[in-house]
Structures are given as C-alpha cells and as structure tokens.
Image (cartoon, helix red, strand yellow):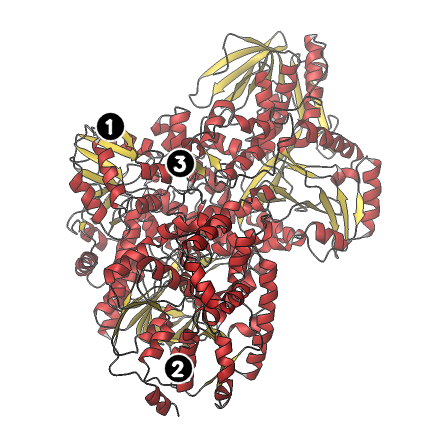
Amino acid sequence: MHRDRQKEYDVIIIGGGITGAGTARDCAMRGLKVLLVEKYDLTNGATGRNHGLLHSGARYAVTDGESASECIKENMILRRIARHCVDETDGLFITLPEDDLAYQATFVASCRKAGIRADIISPEEARRMEPAVNPALIGAVRVPDASIDPFRLTTANVIDARRHGADMLTYHEAVGFVVENGCVRGVRLRDNHTGDVFETRSRVVINAAGIWGHLVAKMAGVQVNMFPAKGTLLIFGHRVNGMVINRCRKPANADILVPDDTVCVIGTTSDRVPFDTIDHLKVTPEEVDILIREGEKLAPDLAGTRVLRAYAGVRPLVAADNDPSGRSISRGIVLLDHETRDGLAGLITITGGKMMTYRMMAEVATDLACRKLGVDKPCLTAVTPLPGSEKPVDKGHTSHRAAEYSTHAQEGRHGTMARTINADSIETRALVCECEDVTVGEVQFAVDKLHVHNLINLRRRTRMGMGTCQGELCACRGANVLCRTARVEPAAAERDLAAFMAERWKGARPVAWGDALGEAQLTATIYEGLCGLNRLCGDGKEIAL
Amino acid sequence: MKFDSIIIGGGLTGLTCALTLAKAGQRTALITAGQSTLHFHSGSVDLLGYDEQGQTVLHPLDAIRALSASHPYHKVDDVAARAEEAARLLADAGLLMDGTTDRNHFRLSPMGVSKPAWLTLNGLVRSAEEDSLPWRTVTFANIRGFLDIPTEFLVDNIRRKGTDVEVKSFTTPELEQARRSPSEMRATNVGKVLADETALRRMVEAIDGLEADGEVILLPAVLGVADARAESSLRQLVDRPIRFVVTMPPSMPGVRLQTCLRQAYQQLGGMYCASDAVTGGCFEAGRLRYVTTENMPDERFYADHFVLATGSFQSRGLMSNYRGVFEPVFGLDVDAADDRGAWTAEYVYDDQPYMRFGVRTDERLLVSRNGVRVDNLYASGSVLSGHNALKLADGSGVDMLTALQAAHNILKK
Amino acid sequence: MAEEIQKKSKSAFNFEQCLKCSICTVYCPVSAVEPDYPGPKQSGPDNERYRLKGMEFFNESLKMCLNCKRCEVACPQDVKVGDIIQAARIRYSTHTPGLRDRMLANTDIVGTLAHNFAPLTNFALKLAPVKAALHGVMGIDRHRTFPAYSFQTFEQWYRRHETEQRRFDRFITYFHGCYANYNYPQLAKDLVKIMNACGYGVRLLEKEKCCGVALIANGLSKQARRQGETNMASMRKAVVRGEPILTTSSTCTFTMRDEYKHLLGIDNDDVRDSLTLATRWLYRMIEDGKLRLAFRDDFRMKTAYHSACHMERLGWIPYSTGLMKMIPGLELVMLESQCCGIAGTYGFKKENYERSQKIGAGVFKQIEEVDPDCVSTDCETCKWQIEMSTGYDVKNPISIIAEALDVEKTRRLNA
C-alpha cells in the first residue's frame, strides 16, 4: 500500500484515467505531494474504451480549428515523450464514390491552416500504401495520424508520478468530501474491496473523473453540466490495416479504423445516454450493425475478419455554463476553478478534451493547483520522456530462437522498461498468454512495477487475454502465476479468474457469432466442463472491473 | 465408393458409432475434418452429473427419467442397456475404466473440483464422495515448469476436501530439455518425451527421490498417448501408490480415448479419412444417396445409411453467422433461436441458450431438411439439440449412447 | 444489406478461424523433439498476427518446420497452419540459400549432372572422404545414404520406346518427377507396364520441370514459380487432349495441386482436377467399371503401408491402399500414421539429421515390429529414409501392383 492515512497531501486527484494519471505526474514533477485515487482499476473508464488514435487533428480541422491545433501540437509531443506507446502508422482520409470529393479541398486547406501536414495522394498510391483500403476510393489525403496505446500511456504516467513521490490507491472510490469553512480539505474514500471508509486530507482536490466527474462535483455540492455520450467500438481479431483509415467527410459514425498493436478497432457511434446507464453500458445490435457496415466501406477485408469484442465508452461532453440545456457543447478542454465559479475553494475540475490531449489538460489543471498552493514551478511534461520512452528500442536483430517473439512483443509494450523483464531462465521465458506472447517474466515484472493485483490489472498492463482466444488458455495460467508472484490467495484467485472470464464474455457476447461463438463454447467447455470453474465463483455473478 | 454406412465426424460419437457398425460386420467409412474435442476431455465419461436444477446426481439412471422431454436420452430406447454396451466398447478398445451406472463417482478436475462421472480411466483420481477424497494426505508432484496444471487451485481445493497436500516438483534431463520451449511444454509433448524407456526410468528415480509423505502421489496425467503402458510401469516402479490428475488441454487421457477407439475401428478394417470435410450430398426421394468431400471432389461416397456426428459450434458441426444458426454440411433443420439476442445469456456461467441448439431429429434420431425427414441420415452426439451438456454434465454419455442408438437403428433396418 | 454482413468468413489461410485449441501441437512431429521450434500454433496463426505488425516478428526458427502439414490434417477448424508458416518464410525470410541448399533444391539439375557420371557419382557418394567433405563443407549429413543415380534416365529409356507407346488409341500423360527419372526409372517403367496392360499408351509432358517442392523448402520460391508455370503450360496441353496427368509421387502431386496455388500464386484451376496419382486414377477407373486388373495367382507379399505426410494431407490413402487390397496374395498392414522425419531435403542437412531421425523413430520401431517383406509408401523421400534407417525395402504401391499383375490376363480383360 502506497499510502499513509495520516499523511496530508497537497493534491488529491480523483480518477485513474489518462487525465488523472497525467495530472498526477505533472503535480509530482512539480514537487507536490500527490495522491491519485481510482474507484476500480486504472484506465477502467473512457481511457480504456476509445480508438487508441493519436489524432493528427485532421478530423477536427474543418469543424473545430482550435481542437485541431491542440491535437497536432500534442501529437508531436507524444511521439517524443511516449514513443513506446505510439505506433507511427500515419493515416489516410479517403473519399469514397458516395462522398463529395469537393470536401477534400476544404479539408486540406483547413488542415494546413491548423498546422497539420496533409498531402493529397492518388487512389493508386493509397492502395499501394495501404492494401486493405477500399479499392473503390476516389481520393485520399495522407496525414500524420498514428495509433497510441492508452493503457501503456496511463501506466507510464503513473510509474513516473510514483517515481516522483506520488501515492496511488486503486479500487478506492471518493464517496464524499471533507469540507471545512467552505473549503474542500480532503476526500472520504471507500475501499471497494473491503468497504472500509476513511478520510484523507489535502489542500487541493482535482476532479479528473471523466464523465463520473459530474457525480463527483455533485457530491461537493457544485454543478457541472455534463452529458454522457456513449461511443461504441468493435475490435477485430488482427491488424487488417497498417495505417489509420478515416472517411474524408464531416465526422460521422464509424468512420475511423485504427490499427492498434495486434488488432484493429472500428468506431465509433455516438449517442447521448442517461447518467444511470454509465456504469452498465450495453452494446446494442444496431450499433454493431452500423459499425460493421461502415467499417467494411473503409476496409472490405473486415467482412472476413473475426470480431473479437464490442465495447462502449462514455465521452464527457460539457455544456457551457450559460447553457444548462446542453445545446452548445464544447469538445475542447474544460478547466473549472470552483473557487471562482462556485465559491468552493480547494476544488478543481478538469474535463472535456480528448485522450490524446491529456497532457495539456494535466498542465492547465496543475498550473491552477500550483497557483492555489503558491508553488511556482514550470511544467516539464512536454520535454521529459515517459518511463520506457527514454530512447528508441532497437528492433530488427534476430537470434532465431522461439523465445525471441516475446522479447519483441515486450519491447513493443514496455519500451526500454522491457530490459528489466527477467528472460534469463527457462521459467521466466515460459509463455502464459500465447496469442499476445506474455511470459512468466513479464507477469512478474507487471506485478513488481505496474501495480498489478489481479487478472484484469494484468490484462490492461500486458495484453494478456486480449488476443484471439480472449483468455481461453492464458487466464488460468495467469491466475496461478499471480498466486505465486502477487501472493494472491488461491480462493481469491479462483473468484478473480471467474470474474475475469465473465468480463471477457461481456465484450464477446454482442459479437458472438461465427468463430467467436465457437471460441466461447470451447472456452466454456474447458473452464466449466473440464475444470468446473463455475463451482468456484460464488453466487455473485461478479464481473471483473 | 460404396459403403453400408458412412459416419461423418471422428470424435467420441463418430468413433463409437463407426466401431459398433464395423463390429456388426458393416462396411463403414468414417470421414472427419480434423481432430475432435476429445482433446479437451477429462478422461471420464459422464452419464448425467447434475439434474436440471443443478443438483448433483448420484443415481444417473433414475435421474435420466426425470429429464425434460427435449433431452436426447429420451431417444435412446434402453439407457441402461446402451450404457453397458458403451462400457464394453471402451473396454474392448483397451480402455480400462472404472465405474458403474448404479451410482456416480467423482472425478477430480485440473482445478481440484469434484465432478460427477460414470466411468473414469483407471489411474485417474476418483472418489466416492463429492466433498472428500479417499486419502488423509496426498503428495502432489508436478513436473518443474509445467504450467498446464493449475497447481495453486488444485491444491487449495483438495485441502478444502479435508485432505492434506504436500506439494513437490521434480524434473529429469529429458524434461529439462522439453522445458526449453516457451510454449510447447504441453501434456502431450511431455508425454512423447516420456514415451522413451530411459526417460521413464529417470522419472521414476526422480519421483522416488522426492521422499513423498502423502499416502498417494498425484501426478499430472501426461503419460501414454495410445495406451496405459507407461502409466502402469510407472505405478509398478514407484514405491508409492500413484494417481493421475487430468491437465489443461491438450488432455492426454482424451487423446488416448481418441487413439484407442480409432485404432480399434481401423483394426476392423473400417475406412478412416482423417482429414476430409464432407461438402454436401445428393438427396433423392427422402434419402441421402451419397456424399462428396473436399479432398476427393469427384468421388461419390454411397451408403445405405449415414450418421452425422459433427459436434457443436466448437467443432463446426453447427455454425452461425450474423443472421442465424445453421448446419453447414447439408443445411439440415436446426432447433435454434432466430433472434441473435436470444442465443446467449448475460453472465458467462448462466445457462447459455446456444448450448442447447442443434440439429432437429425425430424419435429415431433421423434428421429433416426443409421440414422433410431424411430416411437414412441419423444425427448423434453434440450436434443434437435439446440439452446443455455443460450444465447437466452428460456430454460424453449423450455422445456414446446416441451413437449406439443410431447404430442400432441402422442395424434393425 | 444486413444479411450480407460478415458472411465471408475467410482470412488468408483461414488463420482467423483458429480457436487456439492447440490440437495441432499434439501432432507436430517437430515440436515433439525440438524445444527450439515454437510449434505450429505459435509459428502459424499466433504469430501471424504479430507479423502483420512488423517484420521483426518473423523468425528463422520457422525453417525447422518440415512442411509435413500434419497440423493441417489435425486442425478441426480448417486453418491452413502449414501454409501460414511456409507463406511467412517466403514473404519475410531474408536468408539467402547457400550452395548446399541450392544443390539440394535443384533436384533436376543435380540429377542431370549426377546421372551423366552415374557410376562415379554413386561410387563417390558412398566413400567416407566424400561423405566427410559433404558433411563438413556442404552441410549434408555424413550419415545420409544418397539415393543411387541411374545409368539411364527414364526419359532416355522412354525415347527409345516412344513409338511403342504411340500404338495405343488411348493415352495417359505421365509426370514422372525427378526421382523416377534420375534415381529409380523402374517405378516409371512399372507404371508404363500397368498402363499398357490396361490398354493405355503413356505420353510425357512436352516439357517437364521439377515440381519445385525442394525449391520452396529451401527458400527459392521464385525459381519454383517459374518451373511451376512451365509445368502448368505443358499440362494444359494434356488437359486439352483430354488426358489425365498421372503421377507416382504424392509429394510432387501435392505440391502441384495445392502448393502452387497457395504458396506460389500459380493459377492451376484448369489443371488441378486432371492431375492425380496413378493409384487414385486406377482405383476410380476400376470402381467405375472402366478398367480391370488381374493378378498373378502365385503372388505373395506382406507389406506395411506408411502414410506419407503429403499423402495424408491429400486424403488419398484410401486409394493407394484400396488398390493394393485388390491383390489377393497381399497382406497389408497399416502403420500408425506418423512422419518418418525426412521431409524431402530437410533430413539431408546436417543441422536437421538428428532431429530427423528422432522424428522417424516411431515409424522405424513399428516397421520392425511388423517385420514385413517390404514397406509400401507413395513418397520417394520416405523410401530413402526408411530404407536407410530400417534396412527394409520400400516400394511404391504402383511397383507392387506391377509386380503382382498378370499382364496377359489384364490385357485380355481390357481389350
């Protein structure tokens, strides 16, 4: 445990998504005493439920020049400071016969105005660069889009925050505020494993809880007008495309296909949903339908590719303060100083924005916190590489040994940190997850360095269980390795395994047809039929969070 | 080519049926598109493990009578007689199994869960009671570095049954060599390494060297692809009683079931096509005249009778797409929900409706196509609709008994 | 539109259909004996996903794959595991084949040279110093016995007898392959004997090149593609003449029917159905009542049939064994289907020799237990391996048929 209940912090940050993690890093780097709290696991919210797209900004160039400029600026920064999280794929904006080719000129002009390089290329050139692209395209523009792994990015920020002295509590939920004389002086936290509730004090609290920030603010008695916008995405079984493929038209549903590590992701839909659904989002058949239908237009091969999962995240859309109806929505960064806005000192809300502009959001929130605390230190996050990204990892050498696959996979996941993974012995080189090449050594590394206590933590930090079989072989091995390395009690690990498989099924169920249904049955045959895991999971129907 | 009967599918169902028909003197062909789910098998054959309320069944024959009308057992004319026949068939194929239809015993799963079973391969852990094992103390001796048995869970659950467990691990030069592969130290590859006599002798020495305190030594079931010879010599050579625990897939006991049944069938002269997919057939006057296959596209396989034993979704005996569930070989009528939302249940261990989907058959196990019965095409085993084999723990029993029933229906004609 | 969604469920070699059941690993002859080989599942569908991400995920350990296709035979999901591995080698390998590999791969060029100096070659290949030099300099294992080279190639023999073959009014076209041409023309002559007795003349292809299986295995796929195109062009002419193209090697047949299209991208759709093993053609002709064979009354033989890997993959074992079962005096014992370990040129390389023999050990043991008069198999490289490793004679089913055939009676039956 990285906390001391008596310790008084300068800042408590609520929310273990990318914004909270980035803010914790920035605050800690400026010398503040920081506690980051998250009600479940890191990246459990919208951070882990988006495209993983490092926007060039091109998508917003026509409609929102300001966002576009923010994007390209952060895009270039993240390529430097988070290189191990970024796959420099570049992107295409394609025009299909049904689209208006005239839009392309407007698009390119707007990109250039926002400082985004945009080169018109011929359809032949586009087909050559990206063989998966719809061959019927009539126009293409190449832009500096890329893919970025939000799990790794968040983990790297947390690691660096902790290196700079920050404390972190996951599975701890803010259930109230400590308010003294109209001033927020701390947070009441509930341990979501044990149910214990306790107080932790700080001089400033930063609400970085994404859509849940609306509810956090409400607990403090202030109103932030957020509107949950649900976005659904589909993961396909392998990387169909090598470049990001977008539609060159006004942003619409399901018009971005992103290659993310070993898979590719199509999304999103966008629908306003009520607040009471945000913890239990369900993917509808209509959403799946539109995603596949539109996805096939970007890359026809998707028609022959297994869909692994469907998932949905909630974007926090923030209404302008003078418009409680929510008709005028900003997609930009929203920083609220509740002292000046609502007369509640000590509370800051940082919201809006995008996953990939998290650093900028963290910077403005930390600037404000520093002003309140009278600290005058410059922000260095734009120039200081994250752990793992200190220098590029050398690829390309080959030893022709079976174990080499996992070395490359690990370098891809952890950058320079992969060097500390123990691959010296037969034991540590043994594979746990065969689809994603996760070794026993990597699990050990994740337990030691990446804040891993259960299987879902392990999945998000290593990709174990994220491959084709969705945990069929690896989850059981992983659970047993965790018993030894993370000292999880077997009975707890058995429940954890059952809950983990339930979580995998939750994402597979909306797309359970074809090979995915066969895979689900095989997995059930092994875990339920052969092993009897269902007899070890209790009656709670628990789904891992 | 012309046969008396052609069996499509080479798992427990197909082999049981083909073997029975070949024994009866029929000229048979078995055509299978690859290997079967026996590779994930527990090494135990179940008849009925749980009733429809999820309660453990001790007396399977009684409980079978209480099953819902849709259950395939109701198409088996004499469950007790067929069960005896199945047990004989296994024994004749060289598979020594323990158990009776009078009372279920309990097998031990890789995670240490006791599951009801009817017959269990000799040598695997077995107990009379669900909540206890027949020993006060056991030593679990794992092969060093073998990840395909969840040791922590196994030990935890054995302890919960009131048996003390001592955990040890051992290795030999041959096993150390096999362990160099990060991914291939699987039960079956370990078994191949230990097929060598020297390697087995070194294993015996290593186990003896453990100085185990348990009344019995439990080992992961990694020995013997085709027979129990290695298991028996180990049990003779080690100075302590030995029992085996089935591992995560691939399952050595399952592979042995597969191998012994196939060999028994081939020894009777049955034609065995190991890797051919039936692509379709010619239906005439309510009968299937012949089938065609992928590898022999211009060949017509004629037979008087056909048995479909292609398994469920995981074996591609049933398939589904965005629109619906279908039987891919002949497009037979299936019992399945139209609406995709009704295929599955929300929680993973709930009763999943798709598990009950399958080919529709009449009381004689004859299938239908576009609502018309096919008079010489039977379906057996997991391709049948009407029960959830995981919830009832009746999968292997349904496979074998419906296979035998189909064979009998054919022979009666 | 909605009903069209996700209907085409085919990825390249169906690798998306892999359910990760790991059944293929049970039947891989290599991973059973070689811990440095990642196994079919890892090498094939698992890491194909990674290879789509980056070149660095290609690994030369894939060359340990025998290309026996037993993974594909075992796969219940129709994943072309072996094709995925071989295609990855073709696509990503940067390894340039050395002299040894080129020599082993170019079976026809080497065959021409060797046969021209056959007495010398055969003599030299048996000498210890030559073997040592091959082992040390070339990397060809010293334990290997080279197949003897014939004094007269089958093609030379055929040219002398071509006029006799023209006298028939029905013909088959024969793809003899390198082995029957350079090493063992008797097999080809056996086929001619059977065909002639059945009333068929034998024609050769206008231009026959080595099928290329060894070229593919040794990383020379471009050359293999060129030779394949040449073969296809010649075969098309036979197809136009309405003749079947018969073979006596399961490996050549498999390569030309399946690997041409899957690995080399050669369009063989118009030829594929006409190209078949002679045993299969005979069996089907007999079953259709179009042809009859008569066998000698005094013929007695006990043979153990070894299922060559590519024969297993073709799924045609019932034809060869079914044909042999027609011989009244033949006792046929089926060996358990396992790889013998040679895999063409694989077992000749000194780095593979030990592995090759370990893989084959199970087959050798079975043969010794059965103790037949001879072993029968449809593959010539299995023949070398089994003969070298067990001392038993190995015969192609065609040779056994020819030996058992009552030529006169057969001729009369088919007149």
| SS for callout 3 | helix
Q: x, y percentage for residue C323?
A: 34, 76
Chain letter, disc 1 residue? B
Depth-wise, is mark 1 or mark 2 nearer the camera?
2
Q: Quadrant of residue A219?
A: top right
Foreground of the two, C251 or B350: C251
- Report the disc number at residue C194: 2
**Badge 2 density bin: few <14, some 14–19, many ≥20, Cα 10 Å:** many
- Report the disc number at residue B37: none
Write down the residue under mark 1: B166
| Relative to C138, residue C299 above or below | below
Q: Are marks 3 and 2 in contact (CB under 8 Å)?
A: no
Residue depicted at 42% across the width and 85% down the height: C196
Chain letter, disc 2 residue? C
Q: Amino acid at mark 3?
A: Arg
Q: x, y percentage for residue B310?
A: 37, 61
Residue depicted at 56% across the width and 39% down the height: A398
| Relative to B326, residue A329 above or below | above
Q: Amino acid at mark 2?
A: Ile
Write down the residue under mark 3: A477
Quote the CA–CA distance across marks 3 and 2: 59 Å
| SS for callout 1 | strand
Is any atom of residue B351 visible in this view?
A: no
Quote the CA–CA distance across marks 1 and 2: 69 Å
Q: Amino acid at mark 1?
A: Glu
Q: Quadrant of the N terminus of chain B?
A: bottom left
